[in-house]
């Protein structure tokens, strides 16, 4: 099944237009690769030579998770970029108080997690433990928790911030947090917390 790229308007004060447009180019590349891999798996997967050490099929399946996670995480990220923050919803505030001891303690943990990440920092509600966590992913497909529902996704790959912030990761993270559109987060919280 072919997927299509979503469109995201430039409406953020977190990064410049150039940084945003370059990042969208990468996102569109993940959509294209996801579709190419799906096509190859449908037409010529070479299943007969599948092997856990190295095989064409193994490469396709590893690439499939990397590319599709790249699509999904970027869509969540672009939806989290706001021009200015919106008020935090009651469900979100309750969730952060319940699992982190308050918004400030969540923010402190989120910043530490993001500074430690090579790829992504994702606030998620994890269904197995029935708790919220800030998870660190070193790549699109290295770190995701199977039953975790993402609420906030922050891209920590250098391509997401380096043009605008250089090596000042903390400035990028703090700017992102200061402009989270909490209404988007509240909708995600509502999907998992009734």
Image: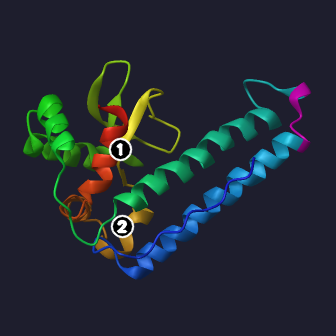
Circle nearer the N terminus (2, 1) = 2
CA–CA distance in space, label 2 to label 1: 25 Å
- Determine which residue is flagged by label 2: 161
| Image: magenta residue range | 43-48
In reply to whether residue 45 is colored magenta, the answer given is: yes
- Check the image and report above or below for 14 versus 150: below
Q: Is residue 193 rendered to the left or right of residue 78? A: left
Secondary element at image label 2: loop
Residue 179 occupies quadrant: bottom left
Q: Is residue 140 rendered to the left or right of residue 162? A: right
Residue 19 pos. (x, y %): 42, 75
Residue 80 pos. (x, y %): 34, 58
Q: Nearer the viewer, residue 104 or 160?
A: 104
Q: Is residue 143 rendered to the left or right of residue 122? A: right
Mark on residue 188?
Answer: 1
Q: Is residue 18 rendered to the left or right of residue 58? A: left
Residue 103 occupies quadrant: top left
Q: Nearer the viewer, residue 74 or 61?
A: 74
Residue 31 occupies quadrant: bottom right
């Amino acid at each position: 099944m072919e997927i299509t790229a979503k469109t995201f308007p430039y409406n953020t004060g977190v990064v410049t237009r150039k940084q945003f447009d370059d990042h969208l180019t990468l996102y569109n590349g993940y959509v294209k690769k996801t579709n190419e891999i799906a096509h190859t798996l449908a037409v010529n997967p070479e299943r007969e030579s599948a092997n856990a050490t190295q095989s064409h099929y193994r490469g396709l399946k590893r690439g499939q998770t990397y590319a599709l996670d790249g699509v999904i995480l970027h869509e969540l990220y672009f939806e989290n970029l706001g021009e200015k923050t919106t008020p935090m919803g009651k469900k979100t505030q309750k969730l952060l108080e319940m699992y982190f001891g308050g918004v400030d303690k969540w923010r402190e943990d989120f910043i530490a997690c993001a500074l430690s990440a090579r790829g992504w920092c994702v606030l998620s509600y994890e269904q197995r433990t029935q708790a919220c966590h800030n998870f660190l992913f070193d790549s699109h497909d290295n770190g995701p928790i199977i039953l975790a529902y993402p609420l906030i996704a922050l891209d920590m790959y250098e391509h997401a911030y380096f043009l605008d912030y250089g090596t000042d990761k903390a400035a990028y993270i703090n700017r992102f947090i200061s402009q989270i559109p909490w209404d988007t987060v509240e909708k995600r919280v509502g999907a998992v917390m009734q």
